[in-house]
């Protein structure tokens, strides 16, 4: 293969940015050679074309790379195993860098290795990658470093992330059937409006006479879809974009999260999910030795619901005044009385983290039962919705047929 010249940008062992060039037949060999030299590749471009124009050949994700929770949980378990086996922190990180298949995580680990080699603590090095390692992750690693139980902290993190992945999977499974049914309804409705109704419209025009009101409405909607379909589609896209921007505003997010909690079918599931995330996260942080106030602040950022986060804010305000956590939960619409009582018992007995873990386990089992009941309820419900939507459109089309004699007579008289 012909040799190409590659310009690179890397980070050296001291964390400084270094630029240079290498000759190699392909990009992969450049990356391998740079890593053998102790560098962390950031950006690689090949020179080529007329006038030595630059061709962007590889851009490796740096401090902003996102890593899926499932990948991060596997990384945490492997990290804990290596630390527990007696390897040094630097050696464990080096092994993980070499065996990690996820490109973004491998690059992040390489950067963490460089930082640790410079004498920076692991938690501080991880905190420089906030999109990959959350505040919860960094806090638990820091607590593990201080207490000398980094392996236990990493195992706890792995268990917490695995529960979150499992919880998301359960919610997605509950949402899959209604979403799929809705898509089928929309596809059938679009086919009827765009292709079938126009055929019937021609028949109605030949018959003449006055059509029933439901049929007139259906024909009018079909005319709009047929003649203005691009505008209708653009309007729906703009509506979706506008809705997404609205719920990203502070007031819009509050309204959306409140609506989700009050939804007739999924509201209870959303509430249990938020409380489960609160109890499991707080339990993990307290077990790792994170201070109560810091643990509550981190938990507030992980509940993923503004209404629940406001409830945690009231707890934080009470704790700062010297009040117990349970007092801030009393009467709050998000947190059930059972969780409040368990937290109260945990605070009185000095086993708050254990009681929170038991509450999280109980809520997880409740979520599983709720998902099962929702699935069994939604199946017949969506069949009714699907049949009702399609059936009503078919009835609207065939209503004039029941009065075909009247339509023909009216048409002749006209």
Image: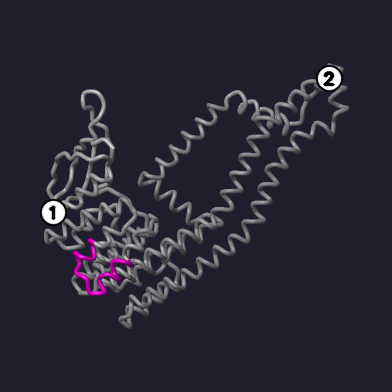
Residue underneath mark 2: 411
Q: Is residue 89 magenta?
A: yes
Residue 146 in sight in this render: yes
The front one of 285 and 147 is 147
How many discs mark residues in the rendered view? 2
Residue 134 location (% of width, % of height): 29, 58
Q: Earlier in the sequence, mark 1 or mark 2?
A: 1
**To which quarter of the image does residue 298 belong?**
bottom left
> Which quadrant: the N terminus?
top left
Q: Bounds of the magenta span?
A: 77-94
The front one of 168 and 101 is 101
Q: Is residue 61 magenta?
A: no
Q: Is residue 356 left or right of residue 87?
A: right
The front one of 359 and 158 is 158
Please tell me which residue is depicted at 34% across the width and 53% down the height of the picture: 102
- Which secondary structure, mark 2? helix
> Which quadrant: the C terminus?
top right
Please tell me which residue is depicted at 32% across the width and 62% down the height of the picture: 75
């Amino acid at each position: 293969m012909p040799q190409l010249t590659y310009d690179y940008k890397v980070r050296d062992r001291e964390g400084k940015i270094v630029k240079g060039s290498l000759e190699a037949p392909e990009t992969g060999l450049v990356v391998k050679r740079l890593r053998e030299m102790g560098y962390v590749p950031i950006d690689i471009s090949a020179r080529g074309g007329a006038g030595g124009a630059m061709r962007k050949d590889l851009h490796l994700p740096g401090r902003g790379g996102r890593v899926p929770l499932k990948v991060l949980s596997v990384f945490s378990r492997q990290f804990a195993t290596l630390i527990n086996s007696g390897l040094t922190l630097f050696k464990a990180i080096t092994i993980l860098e070499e065996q990690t298949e996820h490109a973004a995580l491998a690059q992040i680990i390489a950067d963490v290795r460089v930082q640790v080699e410079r004498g920076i603590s692991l938690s501080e090095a991880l905190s420089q990658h906030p999109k990959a390692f959350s505040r919860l992750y960094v806090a638990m690693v820091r607590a593990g470093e201080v207490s000398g139980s980094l392996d236990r902290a990493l195992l706890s993190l792995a268990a917490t992330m695995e529960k979150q992945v499992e919880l998301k999977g359960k919610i997605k499974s509950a949402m899959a059937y209604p979403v799929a049914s809705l898509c089928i309804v929309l596809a059938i409705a679009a086919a009827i409006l765009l292709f079938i109704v126009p055929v019937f419209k021609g028949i109605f025009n030949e018959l003449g006479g006055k059509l029933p009101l439901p049929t007139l409405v259906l024909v009018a909607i079909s005319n709009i879809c047929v003649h203005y379909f691009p505008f209708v589609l653009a309007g729906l896209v703009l509506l979706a974009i506008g809705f997404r921007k609205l719920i990203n505003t502070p007031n819009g997010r509050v309204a959306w999260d409140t609506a989700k909690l009050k939804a007739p079918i999924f509201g209870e599931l959303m509430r249990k999910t938020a409380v489960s995330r609160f109890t499991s996260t707080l339990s993990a942080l307290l077990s790792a030795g994170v201070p109560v106030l810091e643990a509550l602040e981190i938990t507030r950022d992980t509940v993923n619901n503004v209404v629940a986060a406001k409830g945690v804010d009231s707890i934080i305000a009470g704790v700062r005044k010297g009040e117990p956590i349970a007092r801030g939960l009393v009467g709050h619409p998000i947190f059930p009385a059972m969780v409040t009582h368990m937290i109260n018992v945990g605070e009185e007995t000095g086993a708050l983290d254990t009681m929170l873990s038991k509450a999280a386990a109980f809520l997880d089992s409740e979520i599983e039962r709720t998902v099962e009941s929702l699935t069994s309820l939604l199946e017949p419900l969506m069949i009714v919705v699907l049949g009702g939507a399609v059936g009503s459109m078919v009835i609207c089309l065939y209503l004039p047929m029941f009065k075909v004699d009247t339509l023909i007579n009216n048409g002749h008289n006209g």
